[in-house]
């Protein structure tokens, strides 16, 4: 007999809240057809509406059975599979239509594609993150397509080969250092993550006695897919189309790296006497169990469990109490907005990082040795 958690996870109603992302493409369509103030609906809903819903609905501290079989999660996994074609049609229809729409001014076009980038980052890259962790070739291809639409294909290599292995150490570019503001973090991570991703793939090929230019290098596929997306944007609307495509891609990457910034800010793994680092534990990632924003982000905010058990699919990610994992005071929408204001960010987060240090590493008095981690 299945447990109650398994039985409830197998119903469409348990998965339905996670399908809320499908409400966003119609808002993009509305903005394109109506213009005016409707072009800013996407960021308004994604950031502010879900922040308000978190405040109204509160937290979800329940955990699904982590042993729930895959077939019982089919309604959950379906949304991540259908999003890539939905996003592709939305993005490239807009790239065809908007430059030809006489009722849209330049500012409206820019605002609309900024909003499109908010959802190709908040939803598209996030869904690609879920998909790239799976063994299915179809799911991994969906991840590659989503990342190619925002010109950030190397994220898959960087995330799987570097970030999960080296999180909380100097070798992980994506771990934000204590007292590192986002405006310093962002340009650093753009360069370093690309370099570390390429080096990781080249090193894997070298261990097989193959050259980095071997077609087996995923970077070959990344380049082809991204070239296709760029070529399609140019074909549909010329340089204007390419410019709007680039705007949404940059916005999407900015959204991703804002999230990366907050997920491990100031958290480090202990250096052991043998020069290695302690294993990753739930307390090496910031946790947030806000209900509504986790619907939109398919439980990404249960990040402590994701790094502890990377193979778990999003419906069965666990949340932890404060004595096991550090807690963000708000969901990602609020926290990413705070990260854009460094003095506010430091005021919110520095006391929490210091409390985390006292709780988990009371024996460490001098943290200068960890200043770069």
Image (spheres, rainbow, N blue to C red):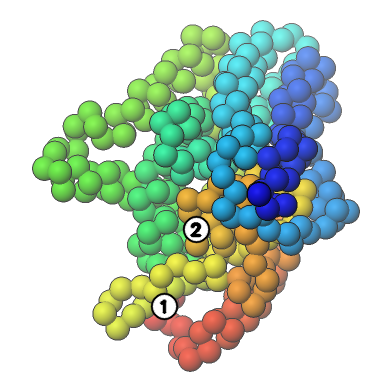
Q: Quadrant of residue 206?
A: top left
Left or right: 100 with respect to 363? right
Percent position (x, y) of residue 69? 56, 45
Outermost residue toward the front in this view: 1
Up the image or down, 361 lies above or below 48; here it is below
Outermost residue toward the left in this view: 209
Outermost residue toward the right in this view: 56
Secondary structure state at the residue bearing disc 2: loop
Secondary structure state at the residue bearing disc 1: loop
Depth check, mark 1 against mark 2: the one in front is 2
Q: Which mark is residue 309?
A: 2
Q: Quadrant of the C terminus?
A: bottom left
At 73% across and 66% down in the image, what residue appears? 329
Q: Quadrant of residue 126?
A: top right
Q: Quadrant of residue 39?
A: top right
At 43% across and 82% down in the image, what residue appears? 368
Q: Which mark is residue 236?
A: none
Question: Spatial distance from mark 1 to mark 2, Cα to Cα?
Answer: 19 Å
Residue 124 can be seen, yes or no: yes
* Residue in the foreground of this view, choosing between 101 and 203: 203
Is disc 1 surrounded by few (<14), some (14 to 19) or many (20+) residues within 10 Å? Answer: some
Ranked by sequence position, the earlier of labels 1 and 2 is: 1
At 72% across and 52% down in the image, what residue appears? 4
Percent position (x, y) of residue 262? 59, 59
Q: Which mark is residue 270?
A: 1
Up the image or down, 159 lies above or below 148; here it is below
């Amino acid at each position: 007999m299945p447990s109650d958690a398994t039985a409830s996870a197998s119903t469409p109603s348990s998965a339905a809240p996670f399908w809320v992302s499908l409400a966003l493409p119609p808002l993009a369509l509305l903005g394109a057809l109506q213009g005016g103030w409707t072009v800013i609906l996407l960021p308004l809903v994604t950031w502010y509406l879900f922040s308000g819903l978190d405040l109204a609905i509160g937290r979800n501290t329940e955990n699904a059975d982590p042993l729930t079989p895959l077939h019982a999660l089919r309604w959950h996994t379906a949304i991540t599979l259908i999003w890539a074609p939905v996003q592709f049609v939305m993005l490239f229809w807009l790239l065809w239509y908007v430059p030809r729409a006489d009722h849209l001014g330049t500012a409206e076009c820019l605002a609309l594609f900024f909003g499109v980038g908010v959802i190709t980052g908040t939803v598209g890259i996030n869904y690609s993150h879920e998909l790239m962790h799976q063994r299915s070739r179809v799911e991994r291809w969906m991840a590659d397509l989503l990342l190619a639409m925002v010109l950030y294909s190397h994220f898959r290599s960087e995330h799987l080969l570097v970030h999960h292995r080296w999180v909380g150490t100097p070798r992980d570019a994506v771990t934000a250092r204590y007292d590192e503001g986002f405006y310093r973090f962002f340009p650093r991570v753009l360069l370093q993550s690309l370099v570390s991703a390429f080096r990781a793939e080249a090193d894997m090929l070298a261990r097989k006695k193959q050259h980095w230019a071997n077609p087996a290098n995923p970077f070959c596929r990344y380049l082809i897919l991204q070239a296709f997306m760029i070529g399609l944007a140019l074909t549909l609307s010329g340089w204007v189309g390419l410019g709007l495509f680039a705007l949404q891609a940059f916005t999407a990457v900015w959204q991703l790296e804002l999230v990366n910034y907050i997920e491990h800010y100031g958290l480090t793994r202990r250096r052991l006497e043998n020069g290695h680092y302690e294993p990753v534990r739930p307390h090496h990632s910031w946790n947030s169990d806000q209900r509504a924003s986790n619907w939109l982000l398919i439980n990404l905010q249960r990040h402590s469990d994701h790094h502890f058990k990377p193979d778990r699919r999003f419906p069965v990610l666990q949340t932890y109490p404060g004595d096991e994992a550090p807690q963000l005071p708000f969901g990602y929408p609020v926290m990413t907005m705070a990260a854009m204001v460094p003095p506010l960010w430091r005021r919110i987060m520095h006391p929490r990082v210091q409390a985390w240090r006292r709780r988990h590493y009371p024996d460490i008095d001098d943290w200068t040795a960890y200043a770069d981690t």
